[in-house]
Amino acid sequence: MVNETQHTCSASSSSRSDGGSSSGSESSKDNSRCSTPVLDADRHERLREKMRRRQDAGDKWFSLEFFPPRTANAAVNLISRFDRMGAGGPLFIDVTWHPAGDPGSDKETSSMIIANTAVNYCGLETILHMTCCNQSKDDITGHLQKAKRLGLKNIMALRGDPAGEEWEEEVDGFNYAVDLVKHIRNEFDDYFDICVAGYPKGHPEAESYEADLRHLKEKVFAGADFIITQLFFRPETFLKFMKDCQAIGITCPIIPGIFPIQGYHSLRQLVKLSKLEVPQEIKDVIEPIKDNDAAIRNYGVELAVSMCRELLDSGMVHGLHFYTLNREVATTEVLKRLGIWKEDPRRPLPWAVSAHPKRRVEDVRPIFWASRPKSYIYRTQEWDDFPNGRWGNSSSPAFGELKDYYLFYLKSKSPREELLKMWGEELTGEESVFEVFTCYITGEPNRNGYKVTCMPWNDDPLATETNLLKDQLEKVNRRGILTINSQPNINGKPSTDPIVGWGPSGGYVFQKAYLEFFTSSEIVTALLKVLKKYELRVNYHIVNVKGQNITNAPDLQPNAVTWGIFPGREIIQPTVVDPVSFLSWKDEAFALWIEQWAKLYEEESPSRMIIQYIHDNYYLVNLVDNDFPLENCLWQVVEDTFELLN
Amino acid sequence: MVNETQHTCSASSSSRSDGGSSSGSESSKDNSRCSTPVLDADRHERLREKMRRRQDAGDKWFSLEFFPPRTANAAVNLISRFDRMGAGGPLFIDVTWHPAGDPGSDKETSSMIIANTAVNYCGLETILHMTCCNQSKDDITGHLQKAKRLGLKNIMALRGDPAGEEWEEEVDGFNYAVDLVKHIRNEFDDYFDICVAGYPKGHPEAESYEADLRHLKEKVFAGADFIITQLFFRPETFLKFMKDCQAIGITCPIIPGIFPIQGYHSLRQLVKLSKLEVPQEIKDVIEPIKDNDAAIRNYGVELAVSMCRELLDSGMVHGLHFYTLNREVATTEVLKRLGIWKEDPRRPLPWAVSAHPKRRVEDVRPIFWASRPKSYIYRTQEWDDFPNGRWGNSSSPAFGELKDYYLFYLKSKSPREELLKMWGEELTGEESVFEVFTCYITGEPNRNGYKVTCMPWNDDPLATETNLLKDQLEKVNRRGILTINSQPNINGKPSTDPIVGWGPSGGYVFQKAYLEFFTSSEIVTALLKVLKKYELRVNYHIVNVKGQNITNAPDLQPNAVTWGIFPGREIIQPTVVDPVSFLSWKDEAFALWIEQWAKLYEEESPSRMIIQYIHDNYYLVNLVDNDFPLENCLWQVVEDTFELLN
C-alpha cells in the first residue's frame, strides 16, 4: 500500500503466487514409499527459487500488492478479488502491515488473516509485510511464529513509521529494517524468504542517496533474498538505481514497484505520504483533467504501460510489482496490454490447490466440496497430512465442524437483499424452490426478472463443465431432483481440453458420471426400485438429515471419479466419492438450507417453513455410473424413476 | 505326509491357500490416509475365517498336503509343483514336519523353508506342521517365532512319534498335541490359526475310540481352530466320526483327509505306518493288479472320486484335504473330476501376489521383474512396508543384492544339459545368441531341433499376452534387439478379458506399451537419434553394465504402465517403470547373462567369451509409449532405427 500510513517502507512489498496455476504435487516424505509424483516443480519451490527459475527461463512475471480491508464486507470482496486477480497468474501477492490496525490479530480484517486467507484459501503465494519500529522482540517473534503456523513463508521486512513525530533510535530495540532481517534469520534460520524495500530516489529520511544504497546493501547482506522498490515515475530512475545497486555489490533480484495513476486524489495523497515529487510533465497532463476520473485512469494506464515496456525492454527487469490500491481495473488493464496477464485455462488439478506448505502433496479430495473448496480447506485445516495419490480407507477422516457459516471467506458475495431477489421474497411451496434451482441451471431470469447466479451450495454461476449437462439438469430440477453437483463421464480426453482438461499436457483425463441432488422421500422410494436394475453399474449413497443412510457401495470404499494418465508419471486421481466423508458433507449440505436460505425469512414465516420442511424431509443422493466408457446411464435412472412415479 | 515317520499324527494336516487367486489388497494402516482399497476380502482374512466364509457361501474347497523334499533338486521341483497345483485354487497347502530331518533349519529341504517358500514366493496360504514330542519348550518356541517371522500364520499341532520303542510321558514336557496347542496359545496368543489331527477310527494308541474322541475335544477346547483327519477308506467311517464329534460338543470344522491310492507299495507302507486296516473289498481289487501301476492309480482315482462325492453329497463336508505324496497326477485328476479344481484365469493383479502378511497391502511393483517375481520378492524381503496405491518417489528403494543365483526357488527348473540344448552347445557369434532369443519368441525348434522354452530372464514359456506381439518381437530379435520383457498397449479392455484382464469384474484395464531389450552400442546410437523424434511421446532408460545411464524421464519419476478402473474403488496401478529400481534390475539382468548362460561353458571357451562380450558391451533399454490410446509406436521406433543403420 502506498497511500496509507506506511509510506517510508510500503513502496516495496512482495509475495508470490502462481495463482490458479500452482499445480500438482511433489513427494515430501523422503522415507515413505507412498509419496506423490511431481506434477509441477512450482508446488514446493521457495519464492526466491521460483523467481530465479522464471528469470532463467526468460519469463516475465508480475506481482500484486494489497492492503488489508477496513470492514468485514470489504474483506469478503477482497477475497473474491484475490480469486479473480489470481487467475491472471501473479508470481505472488503481498499484504501490507499497519501497526495501528492490529495487523497480527485474528480479526478478519487483520493483515495476518488476509494473508492467511490468500495462501490457504485462494492458493496464492503470499508475502506478509511486517514492521518492527516500536515493537518488542517478543511481539515480533510472536507474529512470525503465527505466520509460520498459518503456512506463510515470505516476509517483507520493514521499519515502519515511528509512533511519534520525530523518530529516535531505541537502544536494543528494532530501529531499522535490517534489525528485523537479522532477527528473522536468527530466530527462524532460513525458513522465511525475506524481501526488503529499495528507494530509487533514496529514502526520504536518509542522509543521502549513497548512504541509502549502503543501508540497502546491509539489509541484503543481513539475509534478504530480494528487493522491491518504492514507486517512481520515470523508468530511468529505476534503471539508474539498479545499476548503482549492482555497482556496490547488490546482486539479488530488484523488482520495480509500479503505481498506475488511478485518480487525482489518490496520487496527491500518495505524493504527500511518500515525499516523492511528481514530475512536471505528469502534472502538466493531470491538472487539466483532474475532475475526469476516467481520463486520469486512461492516462495512468498509458503511462504505466509505456514505463513497464521500457523497463522490460531494458533486459534488466524480469518482474513488475504493482501497487493495486486494492483495485482491479487499471492494474489488470496494464497487465493485459503488456501481455503478461496469463489466464491459464489449464488446471493443475480439477480443484483449486491451497498454497499451505503442509498441503503441498495433497492431490485427492472428495467430490462433494467441488463448489465449496474453501469450506473443504477450512474443515481439514487441522489435518497433519493430506491424501496423496489415494484417498484410502478413511474410516475416520476427522472433518472439522462448520459451525460458523459466516466465516468471511465462506460467505456469499451477495448481500441478503440480492439473495432474496434470486431465491424468492416469498416461497409458495416446494415448487417455488424447484424453480430457483431450475433458473440457476438455465441462466434464465426468475418470475421477478432476476437471474439466479448463486445457490447456497455454490456461490458462483454454473461451471462450464456442468453446462455440458444443462438440458438434462434443467429437466430433472423442474421435477424436484434438486441438483447441487454433477459431472459428465469422460473417456480419455486430452489433458489440454479447454473444458474438462487438467494436469500436464500430453496426458488423458477420465471421469465417471456423477450426480448429486436433494429430493423427496417419494422420489427416493421409486429411485431405489429403479436402482435395483443398475445394481452392478451404479453406486449410490442416499441419506437424510438424521443420517439414515442407504448405499450399495463396498464397505467404506472410496470410488475414484476423476483421474488422469500423464507421460512419465504415476496415475493421478484427484476426486473420489468417499462414503465416510459424505456423511460429513451431508451435515454441511443440509445446514446450508437453513443457514443460507431459511434464515433469509422471518421465523415462522411460510417461506422459512417450506425450506425447513425440505431440510427435515428430503434426502441427499449421490449416484456414480461406473461404466465410464459407455453413455452415462444416470439420466436414464432418473427418467425411469419419474416413469415409475407416473 | 502319511507314509513316512509321522503316521500317528500326520494324517491330519492342513494349510490354506487361495493359490493364484489370492487377490487385491486391503487397507492395513488404520491411521494412514494413504491405504489400499480392498480388492478382495481374501487378502487379509485368517484361514479359519476364509474357511467359514467358503462354507457359508456353500462353496466346496480342497487343500493339499506335501512333505519336504530330500534333495535340493527335489526342492526346485516341489516349488514348481506348488505353482502348478496352486493354479487349481487350493484353500491352503500344508507341509509336514519330520524331527529327524532338521525341520526348523535354514536348509532348502527343511519344512520351515519349504513352507516359507510356499507362502512368500508362491503366494499360497500354508500350514506348517509341528511336532512336540521329545522337544524342549525353548526349541518349540524358537520354531514358532521363526515361523511367525517368515510370515507363516497357521500351525498343525501334532504330538509326533516317540523317539524310543515304547513311549513314556515326560514330566513337564510336551506329551500330547494338546500340550503344544496350549503352549502356542500361551506364548502367541491368537496369532496362529491352529489345526489338530482327528482319527476317524481312533488313534491306534488310544485306550478306546471314545477316549480318543475325548482327547480330540481337549485339543479343540485348548484352542484349536479346526481338525483334519487321518485318512480312511470308507465314507461312512468319516461321517460316523463327524457325528460322534458333534455329539460330544466339537463344533469346529472337521476336514476329511483323502488318500487317493497311487500304487501298491505306497499303500502297503502307509498301512504299516498308520496301523490302519485296508478293507477287504479294496484288497480284493488291488491284489490281482498289484504290478500294474496305471491300473492301480486308475482304481485309486475312481475310489477317491466316489468317496469324495459321497462325502460332499452328505452336506456335512465342505472341504477335502488331499494327501498328495508330493505327486500331482492322481490328486489333480480327482479334483478335476469332482469339479472343484478351479483354474481362475482372472488374476487379482497382473503379477503373482505373495501371501506374507507384511505384503498384504502391496499393489505396485516395477515391471522389470514381471517374469522373475520370486526374485523381486527375495530382493524386497527386508522391506518394512510395500508400495500401496502408488510407487512414489523411490529415491532409495533398498533392493537386496541377488548374489546367489542358485537359491533353489530362483533356480531354473531345467538342468544344465537341457539348457545347453536350448541355448546352444557351442556359440559361433552374437548371431547365435540372436537365434536363441528368436526361437524362444517363435516357439520353433532351434537348428538342433530343440525348442527354447526358457531364457535366463524367464524360466517359463512366453506369456499369452506377449504372444500378441509375437510377429514384431520375432522380427526385431532376429536383428539383435534382444527382448526380455514387453507388453502391448491396452486402452480400456474389460477386466475379465482372458488375456490381459485382471482384478474384480466390471472394471476396465489399461496399459502403456512397453519394450525392454538388450542391444549393441551401435544400435543404441541410432536408436537415440530416432528417439529425438519421439521425445514427447516415448520415455526411455538406456544403461550398460557399468551403469552409464541415458534417459529422458522426469527426475526419479515412476511411470505407471498398467492400471485398472473398477466399480466403487480407487484406481489400481500395479506396475510402474521406476528409474531407480531399473538400476537395481539392471545389475540382475546383466548378471543373468553370466550366471545362467556364460557359466554353462568352459572358462575361456569361445561360447563363454561371446556371452561375456555381450554382457560387457550391450545396453539394457526400456521404452514406454505414453500415448496408450494410439497405435503402439515402439515398433516404428525400432523400424526407424534399423532404417537409419542401413
Image: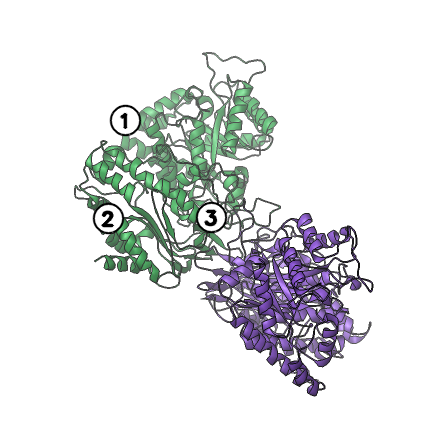
Chain colours: A green, B purple
Kind of residue at badge 3: Val
Image position, residue B564 (x, y; %)? 49, 61
Image position, residue B86 (x, y; %)? 61, 68
Secondary structure, mark 1, is helix
Height in image: A293 above or below A548?
A: above
Residue of label 2: A438
Kind of residue at badge 2: Thr
Q: Which residue lies at the image location 63% right of the left edge and 51% below the top edge?
A: B191
In which quadrant of the rendered image does the N terminus of chain A lie? top left
Residue of label 1: A288
Name the chain letter of the residue that bears numbered label 3: A
Image depth: mark 3 or mark 1 in front: 3
In which quadrant of the rendered image does the C terminus of chain A lie? bottom left
Image disc number at residue A450 = none
Q: Viewed as shown, does residue B169 lie left or right of B210? A: right
Give the total of numbered labels: 3
Name the chain letter of the residue that bears numbered label 2: A
Image disc number at residue A364 = 3
Q: Earlier in the sequence, mark 1 or mark 2?
A: 1
Secondary structure, mark 3, is loop
